[in-house]
Image (spheres, rainbow, N blue to C red):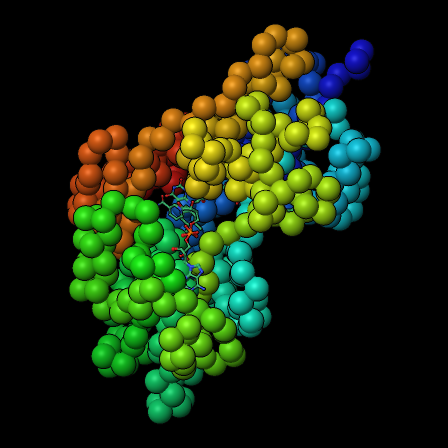
Amino acid sequence: MNRIPRIVILGAGYGGVVTAIRLQKQLNYNEADVTLVNKHDYHYITTHLHMPAAGTDKPENARVDILRLIDEFKVDFVKSTVVQIKPHDRKVILEDSTLSYDYLVIGLGGEPETFGIPGLKDNALSIRSINSVRHIREHIEYQFAKFKQEPHRKDYLTFVVGGAGFTGIEFVGELADRMPKLCKEFDVDPSIVQIINVEAAPTALPGFDSELVEYAVNVLKEKGVTFKIATAIKECRQDSVLLATGEEIKTGTIVWTGGIRGNRLLEEAGFETSRGRVIVDEYLRTKEYDNVYVLGDCSIVLNEEGKPYPPTAQISIQQAETCSHNLVATIRNTPLKSFKFHNKGVVASLGRGEAIGVVGKYKIKGFTAAKMKRLVDIRYLFIIGGIPLVLRKGRL
Ligand code: FAD
Ligand code: NAD
């Protein structure tokens, strides 16, 4: 290849944006043309989205303009939506143009997994993007306004959250914190409000440390959350949720946090996928094309036991570091690096001043864990934007 190789990165989430930032640091002038494509001109900090969804923080605090993160002399940014990936032709079709590439990085994230539950797609909301959380926040306020018009409709103030994984737990924590303010604003008796978290597995946060799960559930119950554990959602109707037990909960709000799958564009492109996610090789490439890397929620990396690591921001960032190394190594004809996940721990918020976590061999909870969560958030801001971004967004 005598001309300058073209690298196209799809998606400016954790995987995509960190790859672009690393490449702009590592590549020399004229070593490669790098293009980053994203639907919006901002990167959103998904790990923060449960807050604006509940209305305990502003959506602006969960987004950063992409042009503040990349150096336009080194990386071209294209604001557009990817509609098709054609790996055989080395082309990507955007809504308004076509891009050719020599190397492709796919970091298009995930989509809510609905498991074919009837009515879920049409009747439930999900925490996925700035636009989706704006919708949830406005919807919640609207339920209060509607209740004031029809005070016999207590179902307007029943909020059902499907799934008590980390997203569900973090969201109900914020929602419970928001309720006293909304009740005051709309002159509503707080005892009318119900927040119900429904979980199919025998415990909330399945697979997580049982002592911390118990702590989390108690903190959230104390804040007013009701749990229905070992109870699957079977159907979502316009004004109710049907549970596997046969119970029907009348509600005006269903927020689905029951899991994610990979972006559909990957299976449509012909890659072999499992729930929309591509099992990548040790260098993070697809098995069909060694010039296509897949990162983050649309990839699967298997652990030593052959099980997929959970899709997290943490693994996406680490994949981006390996991916950028391997792209530079390929261009320079030097050895590639195998990806190895280093689990730095998990910390989950339970609302204001409360969290749980496992960091190394330590279990943490309460205020200490909440402080740790802030540190994790600040570290990420530092990785993508250095001290200026920490000072602007980190509220130090
Ligand atoms: P994403 O961050 O989802 O980014 C995908 C990007 O692709 C987006 O910018 C999107 O706009 C863009 N895009 C999508 N489709 C198109 C298209 N067709 N054309 C153009 N652009 C497109 N993980 C942790 O490790 N720690 C946490 O504390 C944590 N907290 C979380 C809290 C919440 C509420 C949620 C929902 C998730 C949380 N996660 C956490 C998981 C983590 O956010 C995801 O694993 C991570 O965002 C995945 O990164 P990604 O780069 O794969 O995709
Ligand atoms: P998840 O898949 O981890 O959890 C979904 C939950 O929904 C599961 O507990 C599942 O049993 C339940 N569920 C599925 N079908 C159901 C049904 N029909 N009825 C009721 N419950 C049902 O999804 P998530 O919580 O969105 O998390 C996605 C990824 O993001 C995970 O890897 C998670 O670790 C990560 N994440 C991390 C954090 C953090 O570290 N603080 C926060 C949020 C998300």
Q: Nearer the viewer, residue 75 or 176?
A: 176
> Which quadrant is home to the N terminus?
top right
Left or right, 393 with reference to 288: left
Left or right, 329 with reference to 91: left
Seen at 66% across and 40% down, the residue is 272
Rendered image quadrant of residue 282: top right
> Where 13 sits versus 184, above or below?
above
Rendered image quadrant of residue 59: bottom left
Rendered image quadrant of residue 174: bottom left
Seen at 53% across and 56% down, the residue is 113
Q: Position of residue 47 (x, y in %)?
A: 41, 45
- The tally of labels here is 0
> Which quadrant is home to the C terminus?
top left
Seen at 39% across and 30% down, the residue is 382
Seen at 43% across and 41% down, the residue is 310
| Residue 29 seen anywhere in this rendered image of the structure | no
Q: Nearer the viewer, residue 44 or 258?
A: 258
Q: Position of residue 62 (x, y in %)?
A: 43, 47
Residue furthest front as drawn: 305
| Residue 307 seen anywhere in this rendered image of the structure | yes
> Where 21 sits versus 184, above or below?
above
Q: Nearer the viewer, residue 79 or 114?
A: 114
Q: Position of residue 190 (x, y in %)?
A: 24, 77
> Where 17 sits versus 41, above or below?
above
Q: Nearer the viewer, residue 17 or 327?
A: 327
